[in-house]
Structure formats: C-alpha cells, structure tokens
Image (cartoon, rainbow, N blue to C red):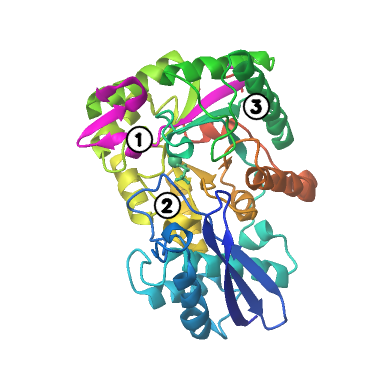
Amino acid sequence: MKLTALDALQIFDSRGHPTIEVIATLEDGTVGRGLVPSGASTGSHEAWELRDRDPRRFQGRSVFKAIGHVTDEIAPALAGHDAFDQAAIDAALIALDGTPNKSRLGANAILGVSLAVAQAAARARCLPLHASLGSGTLLPLPEIQIFGGGKHAQGRIDIQDFMIVALTATSYAETLEVAANVFHAAAEVMRDRGKLAGVADEGGYWPLFDRNEEVFDALLASIERAGYTPGREVGLSLDIAATDLHRDGFYRLGLEGRRFSSEDFAALMIDWVDRYPIVSIEDPMSEDDWEGWRLVRDAIGHRCQLIGDDLFTTHLDRIERGIAAGVANAVLIKLNQIGTVTETLAAIRRTQAAGWLPVVSARSGETEDAFIAHLAVATDAGQLKVGSFSRSERLAKWNEVLRIERDLGPRARFIGAGIFETAGIRLPGATV
Ligand code: PGA
Ligand code: ZN
C-alpha cells in the first residue's frame, strides 16, 4: 500500500506549547495522523526536538521549520514507499536525516511521520493499531501519579513523580478503580492539611510540601484513606528524575538545602526503599552516573524495579551498555526520545530479551493521541506510565486501554504486579 502524501500542521500540547501533527495519506485514500509529545525533564542523550528559536513567536517554541521538513523534503523522498513496511519507512527517514540524533530534520518531524504512517497502515489493514503494531495481548499495569514535582511543578519539590501501583488488582479495569480511589482520597488528605492547590503538569496534585519525605506521609495517608494497605494492595513508585538534581558533581535536594555525593545519594535511595513500600524507582541516579546506578542496582535490584529513563533515552546502544553493566532492570520507553516506531520496537524487544522490563511512557507535554496505549499492548510491555488521573491528555491513554481490554475480550491477558517476578524482582510484602 503506497504512501502518496504527507502534510503537517502546528498544534498545541497539554502545556499549550506548539507541537507537530503529521498527516499521512495512502493510495487508497486512508489517512493516519501522528501527534508528537514533548518532555520537560529531558535527557541530554535524547533525539533532537527541532524548534524555531524565534523569540518573537511562541517563546521560540514554534515548529514551522520541522513542518517545512515534512512537506518539502520528507514527503517527496517517501512518496511511493510501502506504508506497510514500517521498518523501511523509518530506515529511509533515518538515512534522509543523516545525523546520529535526528537533528537535521528534527526528531519531532521524523516521529510525526513515523507515527502517522503506522496509524494509516493500521487503518488500511482494517486493524486496531495495537494489532497492526504487534501481536501482544498483555494489558499493562499502570504507574499512576498522585503528586507531581520537579520540572513539572516548577521545582516546587525536588522529586518529580510520586506514583502508585495496584499490586493485587486482577484486571486492568480494577487498577483504574484503585487509582481513582487513591487519587480522590489524596484530594481529601490535601484539603484536610490545607495543602490542596490544583494540579501539576501531569495531573497529579500540586506539591505544597516542605520536605520530600512529607510527600511519602501524604501518599501513605491517601492509600489508607482509600481503604487499602500500603505495600499490600498498593505500592509506591517514584521517578526521581535525578539528572535534574545533579549539578557540579553533587545531587541536590533544594527544598531541604541538602547536598549529596553520588554514594550518599545512592544510600538515600536505598534507605527510602527500606523504609517505604516502594516497588519501583525511575532515574534514582543521573544520566551519566553509571557507577552510582550500579550501587543502587546491587543493593536493591532484586526487590525493586529500577527504571532507566534519562539513562537510556530509549536508545539501543545505551540499553546494550546498561545490560552489559547490569545497572538497572527496566527501561522507560518514550517514542520521541529515539524518534521512530521501528527503533522504539527494537528497544522494547532488546529490553525483554535481556529479561528486563519495558515501561511504556508518555511525556509531560502530551497530546490527545493514545498511540502509546496500543504500543504497550502490542509489545506485551506489561507496564504503562502516563501521568496522573486527571487532565484528558492523561485519561485518553488510560481510557484507550479500557477500550482495548473490551475489544480483546477473552484474548486479553493481565498479570498485574506479576510482571515484576518475570524479571526476578521479588517485592517484599506483596501478596501477589
Ligand atoms: P518528561 O517527564 O516528559 O518531562 O521527561 C517524564 C519522565 O521523566 O518520565
Ligand atoms: Zn522519568
């Protein structure tokens, strides 16, 4: 099925910043769209997001150059290519760009095309997107944010994501019931403490806390208020986003005015896992602190999921290095960190082949598109992280998995927190 046309327009993400939408048209008239998200706590090894940097327009964030690259350069180069051959489409995009980090055409332009072609191909095949992308049937265990922080709350607290994981839910739908209960209980807890003040970028409550560890207390109180036992039905999950805390060789918790060496920060992470029912930590250490990562993995990798986000940036070479060095046991998967669907699928496969866990993730700047919900199911990834339980760019993804669950019917599989055991992670206290 030939790709006949590509067009693009500037739309806006969930923070009101410009982003790119690509429209792919096939020879039978089928249309697919690719909506590109954008991060705030980005890793330095990510593929390059091309912005116009014209301070007079959209604070320099417009994407008209990337749009021009789609319409003037990529469209003529890809016209006539087989839209059913995603690998060849993506290889052609990579070759046309010619740079290691997609900085010439822009990873946002390239990903928009890659996503649009994938969606058009699924429609032309009359398949749901997940079935077109892969044969997976495993519904993901969600990591759902309750409090937002870090760069998603203007640095109001240091740690970026305080999330929950439903440990004993027996269906995907039940994980959302748990999330809804805890999310609304958290509002009551915050209100009672005089700390309810709206939500951060990913829909979690705005963090009016004085110490990072106060958040744990609020989180545990919220879980209990919702009628659950922390560590039994509901576990905690953190994204430290430690790259953002690392400056001049030290990790800094600005809220408390504390400064840590790499060893001391690793010790703090280990201490938190000892003291709280934490089942997963993302980016406990900075993106190039491989030695610090190894310390954490050696100490707690057998009982806590350790996800590399900025560390790996969904990049196969960095994932290989991480597997060889044994520094984590899970990889965050973000399409726009690497820039094509094919490379993202390869990153997921490599992660799984190593016995590690892929966690498919949204960005803090999201769109109404739910591609990643399909990606998670198609690849049997087992976990999905898209922010909190408010704001429709978040619920668009959670809800899409409900639709997939219904569409798959008896073919849908759910192993919930059993996913951790598949990677040899034994959660203390969990009754799964
Ligand atoms: P980002 O945040 O999209 O701002 O990078 C998400 C994350 O760090 O996981
Ligand atoms: Zn992260």
The N terminus lies in quadrant: bottom right
Tell me the residue at 71%/75% (across/down).
Answer: 30
What is the C-alpha distance between the residues marked 1 and 3? 25 Å
Sequence-earlier tag: 3 or 2: 3
**Dot 3: within a 10 Å radius of its alpha carbon, few (fewer than 14), some, or many (20 or more) residues?**
many
Could you say where residue 42 lies in the image, as x and y percent from the top left?
Answer: 39, 48
Tell me the residue at 34%/20% (across/down).
Answer: 256
Q: Which amino acid does label 1 sit on?
A: Ala
Sequence-earlier tag: 1 or 3: 3
Is the distance from the Cβ of mark 1 to the nearest ligand 2 atom less than 8 Å?
no
Say what secondary structure mark 2 lies in: loop
* Displayed quadrant of residue 118: bottom right
- Is 231 included in the stretch rendered in magenta? yes
Q: What stretch is highlighted in magenta?
A: 230-259
- Residue 183: give its label: 3
- Is 196 included in the stretch rendered in magenta? no
Q: What residue type is labelled 2?
A: Thr
Could you say where residue 83 lies in the image, as x and y percent from the top left?
Answer: 60, 76
Tell me the residue at 26%/32% (across/down).
Answer: 292
Could you say where residue 354 lies in the image, as x and y percent from the top left?
Answer: 42, 45
